Amino acid sequence: MTIVLITLGFSAILAFVLGAALGFFKEKFKVERDPKIDEVRNALPGVNCGGCGYPGCDGYAEAVAAGDAPVTKCAPGGKAVSDALAALMGVNASAEDTVAVLLCQGTKDVAPAKGQYVGVPTCRAAKLSTGGTKLCSYGCMGFGDCTKVCMFDALHMGDDGLPHVDYEKCTGCGMCVKECPQQILGSVPRARLGSVVVCSNRAVVKATVMKSCKVGCIKCEACVRACPEQCISMVNGIPVTDYSKCTSCGICVQKCPTKCYKLLETDIMGKVVIKEPVSV
């Protein structure tokens, strides 16, 4: 019994000594936390979406406070958060609110499948195993990988086999853009919307395009020739709009023979709407 008591007493003394030593060395060698980190973190919305490219808001706050990340990476917070971070860090901010746009309109009715796909039902798996499930190798495969990573309930698969963006909920975080293996989800400035080509088929032969999708871009360049602002140019076989010049006149939309243009604008409430183009 004496041995047991001695052992317990020795263990208690040893635990006390070790605890005191740990406390001393922790205080002696502690790394002071930059108070700027907490200030930056408190300015962030706290959604932890990962759209900034860092592990949540905590990771982004540490990077911003250390000067290793720009203050404009928080898409859910938009310009207001970027301005707040810029004020904290003493830098200039040039953030721009964006929304996600699906650059494809190849529904099940107009873009036929190559065959019956029996693999893992994800876009990434289908891309790796078969190169795509449709005759259009550039189009949406419809498994909804993008909808699964959206943390704001802004993407939903429709009965037509395509994801649809809820522009009232979309924060422009970019997670869906990063997730899409086809790279057919793009980010468009919310404040400078205009004509958007909802096609990503880069095939240069008209017959090839029409065989794979009835509403694909046939590279006729009618939009390029018709644009009065000369803000449309062909890039890798796809018309691209310079939004700094686009006036949303809708002429390109009217001239497109396959109707692969959409005219997106923001109304007075800041809501993104698809408008009917003006007559030409």
Image: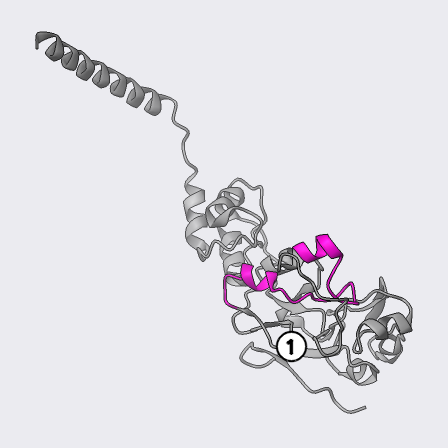
Q: Which residue is drawn at the image coordinates 67% and 71% (left, top)? A: 192
Q: Secondary structure at mark 1?
A: loop
Q: Is residue 142 magenta?
A: yes
Question: Where residue 121 appears, x then y in whole percent?
Answer: 62, 60
Residue stretch rendered in magenta on the structure:
125-153
Q: Is residue 128 magenta?
A: yes
- Count of all numbered marks drawn on residues in the image: 1
Question: Where residue 134 appears, x then y in whole percent?
Answer: 75, 67
Query: Would you say 20 lies left or right of 140 here?
Result: left
Quadrant for the N terminus, please. top left
State the residue position of label 1: 160
Question: Where residue 58 appears, x then y in whole percent?
Answer: 46, 46
User: In the rendered view, would you say 40 is above or below 13?
Assistant: below
Q: Nearer the viewer, residue 14 or 42?
A: 14
Please say whether residue 240 is visible from this viewpoint.
Answer: yes
Location of residue 115 (image quadrant): bottom right
- Amino acid tagged 1: Asp
Q: Which residue is drawn at the image coordinates 71% and 60% (left, top)? A: 183
User: In the rendered view, would you say 19 is above or below 94?
Assistant: above
Query: Would you say 137 lies left or right of 271 here?
Result: right
Quadrant for the C terminus, please. bottom right
Question: Where residue 163 appears, x then y in whole percent?
Answer: 62, 70
